[in-house]
Amino acid sequence: MNGYTYSVTEISEYIKKLIEGDPYLTNVSVYGEISNVRPRKGHIFFSLVDQNAKLDCVLFGGDNMGIHLQEGRIAIVEGSMSVYIPHGTYRFICSSIRYLNHMGLYQIKFETTLKKLVEEGLLSRTKKALPRFPKRIGVITSRDSAAFQDVVRTAKERKAPVEIYLFHTSVQGESAKEELIKVLRKVNEYDLDLVLIVRGGGSKEDLWVFNEEEVVREILKVKHPVVTGIGHEVDHVIADLVADVSMHTPTGAAEFVLPDFSRIHEDLEKLFERAKNALLENIDRTEEKLNMFYRYLLSIGRKKSEINKLLSEKVKELTARLRKSLLNFFKRNQEKLDHLSRMLENLNPLKPLEKGFVLVRKNGEIVKEASKLQSGEIVEFVFKDGQKKARVI
């Protein structure tokens, strides 16, 4: 070492000179499959990929020139390597692009897998029905992902009394395939109402694990209804085609399976209010008819005083009986409404935590008996404001 301390900029500028000054990286041609095309501010950003690597590329001004790149096509791209100092990344600056007359490796594999599944009739199978009010939901995704947080947030916003079981797995990278297959088999060991498979958006390579034939076939073996929310609206994977329900995003998937209990309660209140108003109107109309009849009898002039007294008492009696009946009806229905509200509240498995109780879980399952625990095992205590882990003595 020369003992000199360099700044980040100095190191980046030195690397830039090395790469951009290398004749083997200047005015060269690169062969690969076009992927992850992203027009932006008049330019076109994309990737060239093969089975083992990815090269980020940019065609400056390409979008303004009306150039439209086709994903999945094999192309020869001419240009030079460059370093973008602010981000410390390298990319290939394209000067021209020429398509070859055959599909890319990813596209070929996608269509081959899809064709095989179609020929086996797996895409036309009968879909499993989803429960209207699920109580236990399995979520297959990464524990650190925004997709998982989207599901949890949606459940809280909708006040859904549901238990969420996280089945952690990588959702991209070399280990994703094996991990995903493992958790897809594991969910069959749990008593669940349905399973969500969720992941945020990304490039075709990032989402590719959900096109793998082994993963897709394992999804078909899940005994619970499966709902996918993978990527964004523009993303399409084979896992969506074999799921019982497919939504565009993780949030969309969560919203589809979780009823909005706050809205249900509001609807019950509105229904009760409409029934009450209808009865009041009916009583008013009945009372008016009685009064009209009373006035008619008075008009005939026979025994006015006796008729007046008799009918006045009858009107008061009937009105009192109607109002008493109405009050009893309101009371009974209010009790029913309160009972339904309490039932909805009691469905919440975390309600006892508000009273100081603690929920004990081992490996994601609720422990109901002390005999189920062994010394040395790790358990999770769920309080109303969070979770803590402990070792059994």
Image (cartoon, helix red, strand yellow):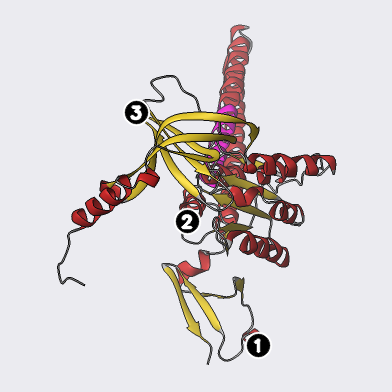
For residue 371, which numbered disc appears in the image? 1
Q: Amino acid at mark 2?
A: Ser
Q: Horizontal and vertical percent for residue 392?
A: 53, 88
Looking at the image, residue 13 lies above or below residue 369: above
User: In 3D space, how far apart are the residues under numbered discs 1 and 2 (Cα atoms)?
Assistant: 35 Å
Camera-side residue of 382 and 312: 382
- Outermost residue on the left side: it is 4
Camera-side residue of 94 and 88: 94
Q: Give the magenta-colored segment's residue range.
A: 260-280
- Residue 172 is a magenta residue: no
Marks 3 and 1: in contact by CB < 8 Å?
Answer: no
Q: Amino acid at mark 1?
A: Ser
Left-right relation of 46 to 172 = left
Tag 3 secondary structure: loop
Q: Residue at x 61, y 77 (%)?
A: 367
Camera-side residue of 16 and 158: 16
User: In 3D space, how far apart are the residues under numbered discs 2 and 3 (Cα atoms)?
Assistant: 29 Å
The answer to which image quadrant residue 214 occupies is bottom right
Q: Residue at x 70, y 49 (%)?
A: 131
* First reached walking from the N terminus: tag 1 or tag 3: 3
Q: Amino acid at mark 3?
A: Lys
Specify few, some or many for label 1: CA neighbours under 10 Å numbering under 14, 14-19, or 20 or more. few
Left-right relation of 330 to 12 = right
Camera-side residue of 29 and 346: 29
* First reached walking from the N terminus: tag 2 or tag 3: 3
Helix, strand or loop for the magenta stretch, by majority: helix
For residue 32, which numbered disc appears in the image? none
- Residue 270 is a magenta residue: yes
Q: What residue sits right under mark 3 in the picture?
A: 41
For residue 145, which numbered disc appears in the image? 2
Q: Horizontal and vertical percent for residue 93?
A: 38, 37
